[in-house]
Amino acid sequence: MALYEHVFLARQDISNQQVDQLVEQYRGVLESNGGSVGKVENWGLKTLTYRINKNRKAYYTLMNIDAPSAAVQEMERQMRFNEDILRYITIRVDEHEEGQSAMMQKRDDRPRRGGRDDRGGREDRGPRRDRDDDRPRRPRDNDSE
């Protein structure tokens, strides 16, 4: 059997309990077709980059799947008919990652980008320059040469 990572987005106006019911429903579809579901991560309600079917937010859920391709195709077919599922993607992987996914890691573990030092002040970046100093000035019609 092949290994897959499957992520789906559920509508914002359903509850966490309904998202869990969706996971159990699709787990049943996979198991009835000879597959199994490993780790399931609920990433929570997140803002979408763009609206999908008038939704600005969605519940993100990751499922690690070990199943034949026919079982995955049947699950995806049923997801197409479900109005609560906005989007889904299934990716075949060589092996499942151990531990938490990148989405579940704490933000404090990742290095920060920005121009602030530990005290919250501005780093020393040298003198500030005006915008006019950065690019050449174009002469105007009323300027005398």
Image (cartoon, grey):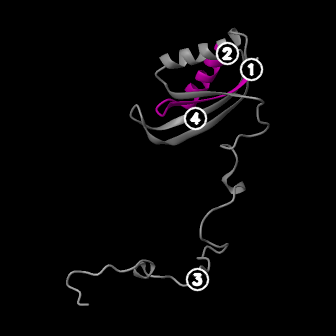
Give the percent coordinates (x, y) of residue 105.
70, 47
Q: Is residue 42 left or right of residue 14?
A: right
Give the percent coordinates (x, y) of residue 34.
73, 10
Indicate the secondary structure of the residue bearing disc 3.
Answer: loop
How much space separates mark 4 and mark 2, taking CA atoms?
Answer: 23 Å
The type of residue carrying mark 3 is Gly
63 w.r.t. 33: above or below: below
How much space separates mark 2 and mark 3, taking CA atoms?
Answer: 59 Å
Q: Earlier in the sequence, mark 1 or mark 3?
A: 1
Q: Residue at the location (38% across, 34% down)? A: 54
Q: Are marks 4 and 3 in contact (CB under 8 Å)?
A: no
Indicate the secondary structure of the residue bearing disc 2.
Answer: helix
How much space separates mark 1 and mark 2, taking CA atoms?
Answer: 7 Å
How much space separates mark 1 and mark 3, taking CA atoms?
Answer: 56 Å
Residue under pointer 1: 2
On the image, which quarter does residue 130 sit in? Answer: bottom left
94 w.r.t. 138: above or below: above
Indicate the secondary structure of the residue bearing disc 4.
Answer: strand
Q: Nearer the viewer, residue 35 or 4?
A: 4
How much space separates mark 1 and mark 4, taking CA atoms?
Answer: 23 Å
Q: Residue at the location (69% across, 50% down)? A: 106
The nearer-to-camera label among 1 and 4 is: 1
User: Callout 1: few (<14), some (14-19), or many (20+) C-alpha neighbours within 10 Å?
Assistant: some
How much space separates mark 4 and mark 3, taking CA atoms?
Answer: 43 Å
Task: Magenta stretch: give its range.
Answer: 3-30
Q: Earlier in the sequence, mark 2 or mark 3?
A: 2
The label shown at residue 126 is: 3
The label shown at residue 60 is: 4
The label shown at residue 103 is: none
